């Protein structure tokens, strides 16, 4: 059952009702504006509880009534069960969609992310005797040191300096375009 209080009910009136329920050995949960009793009251007990000052109504409790905590625990338990079943299914039922993966070879359908397209195209199109990783490492070091190394070139011949930068940018863009077009 649910015992609801008036909005103007004072703490003294609420305490009197709680003491009466304790004397009758009726368990309850106090939610501030109402009490949820652990069991249904008989007709006389319900009339007695309703006659207390500050009580607005006495209604039978919905059997499906549950608190937020109970809902959270139910959802957590259900989620844990579903995840557990999925983990067991993944562990016990092996994938059979195709041949086993070869960790040393990447399929051609899988495209690298766009910042790495130039690198991959350079690796694909370079002859086998060209050490591509060393070439890229050297180019990276050159790029980092370029402001110090080319200061004189930029001061004396800015057109050549700009042309070299444009050629390198065009080379990177061309390799990226080749990677996308492939």
Image: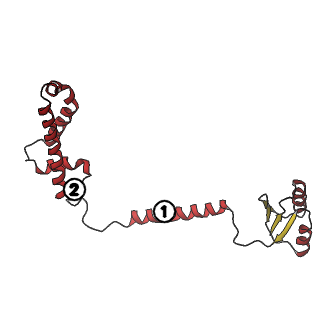
- In this view, the residue in front, 36 or 87, is 36
Residue 63 falls in image quadrant: bottom right
Whether residue 96 sits left or right of residue 5 in the image: it is left
Q: CA distance from mark 2 to mark 1?
A: 32 Å
Quadrant showing the C terminus: bottom left
Q: How is the image coloured?
A: secondary structure
For residue 31, above or below residue 171: below
Residue 4 falls in image quadrant: bottom right
- In this view, the residue in front, 142 or 52, is 142
Taking the spot 87% from the left edge, 54% from the top edge, the residue there is 11
Marked residue nearer the N-terminal end (2 or 1) = 1
Which secondary structure, mark 2?
loop
Whether residue 55 sits left or right of residue 114 in the image: it is right
Q: Which mark is residue 150?
A: none
Taking the spot 92% from the left edge, 73% from the top edge, the residue there is 44
Q: Position of residue 174 (x, y in %)?
A: 15, 49
Mark 2 vs mark 1, foreground winner is 2
Give the residue at mark 1: 84
Which secondary structure, mark 1?
helix
Q: Residue furthest bottom?
A: 43
Give the residue at mark 2: 106
Q: Position of residue 149 (x, y in %)?
A: 17, 26
Q: Residues within 10 Å of mark 2 (few under 14, many from 20)?
A: few
Taking the spot 86% from the left edge, 58% from the top edge, the residue there is 8
For residue 15, above or below residue 66: above
Quadrant showing the N terminus: bottom right
């Amino acid at each position: 059952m649910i015992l609801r209080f008036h909005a103007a009910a004072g703490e003294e009136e609420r305490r009197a009702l709680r003491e009466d329920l304790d004397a009758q050995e009726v368990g309850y949960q106090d939610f501030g504006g109402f009490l949820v009793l652990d069991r249904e009251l008989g007709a006389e007990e319900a009339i007695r509880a309703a006659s207390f000052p500050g009580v607005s109504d006495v209604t039978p409790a919905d059997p499906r009534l549950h608190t937020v905590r109970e809902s959270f625990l139910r959802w957590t338990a259900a989620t844990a069960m579903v995840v557990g079943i999925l983990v067991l299914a993944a562990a016990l039922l092996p994938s059979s969609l195709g041949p086993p993966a070869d960790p040393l070879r990447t399929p051609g359908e899988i495209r690298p992310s766009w910042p790495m397209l130039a690198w991959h195209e350079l690796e694909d199109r370079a002859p086998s005797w060209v050490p591509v990783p060393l070439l890229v490492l050297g180019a990276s070091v050159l790029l980092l040191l370029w402001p110090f190394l080319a200061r004189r070139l930029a001061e004396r011949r800015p057109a050549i300096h700009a042309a070299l930068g444009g050629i390198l940018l065009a080379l990177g863009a061309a390799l990226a375009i080749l990677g996308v077009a492939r």
